[in-house]
Amino acid sequence: MMMQESRAWIVALTISGLGLTLWGGCSRDVRLAGRKLRSVTVGTATHYGVTLDQNASPQQVTYVLLRAIRDDFLARSEPEREAALDKQFDICAANRIAARNRVPANRDELIYNVVYRWTPTVSHYAHDFETEWGKAQERFVLKGPRPLRGSNNGPMECEVLTEVDDPGGDPNARVVLAVYLVQDNGFWRVLHLGFDTRRRSIGN
């Protein structure tokens, strides 16, 4: 009788452990429930009349990025916002973003969590993002390209800087927005973006 009970406990524990293993292996970030996750493939994309193939410049990619962020911020409906997000996912350095993550995670969720934060990061200045390529190009300053850190003969990286004004008109609130790009599968794509906190104008 004791042996049978012991075997029963072993079976129960084994089933319980298997269940936990399966649950843990299949678990998803509950915060992303209901979100539209994209399985991003880096390739040619055309948005706002600009074809972003392997010949496209970092400035062209930055122009599309900032327009998409502007559209995202000004979207009046969920479909409009998802369409703007689709453009941002199209020009993200998906493979590089995934490679930088040192913690095991679902690839689609990881990329979503990075790209989804781009608009909130810079939306305060979205009103000053140009909607015409010619005007945007004049405001962009390219830093680089240079070999990707740790790779002498491999992909290149660079930054595109642009000054943006505060919507309230305060000249002291002007900032320099920096878009960091890297070559991914031969395409210039966005790795991350933020502000150059060391200066308020590119000339400083």
Image: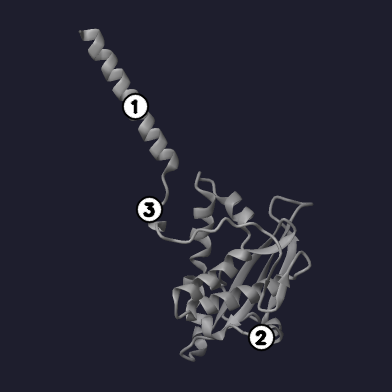
Quadrant holding the N terminus: top left
Residue 188 is tagged as none
- Residue 35 in the image: x percent, y percent? 44, 61
Mark-to-mark CA distance, 1 and 2: 61 Å
Q: Determine whether 172 is above or below 47 in the image.
A: below
Along the polypeptide, which appears first: circle 3 or circle 2? Answer: 3
Q: Amino acid at mark 3?
A: Val
Residue at image point 39% right, 57% down: 33
Residue 197 shows in the view: no
Along the polypeptide, which appears first: circle 1 or circle 3? Answer: 1
Check disc 1 and report its element: helix, strand or loop: helix
Residue 30 is tagged as 3
The residue at the far left in this view is: 1
- Residue 123 in the image: x percent, y percent? 49, 77
Check disc 2 and report its element: helix, strand or loop: loop
Q: Which residue is mark 1?
A: 15
Q: Amino acid at mark 1?
A: Ile
Residue at image point 76% right, 64% down: 54
Residue 93 shows in the view: yes
Tell me whether circle 3 and circle 2 mark residues in contact (CB < 8 Å). no
183 left or right of 28?
A: right
Mark-to-mark CA distance, 3 and 2: 39 Å
3 or 2: mark nearer the eye: 3
Decide which of 4, 159 is in the foreground and name it: 4
Dot 1 alpha-carbon crowd within 10 angstroms: few under 14, some 14 to 19, many 20 or more:
few
Q: Which residue is mark 2?
A: 132
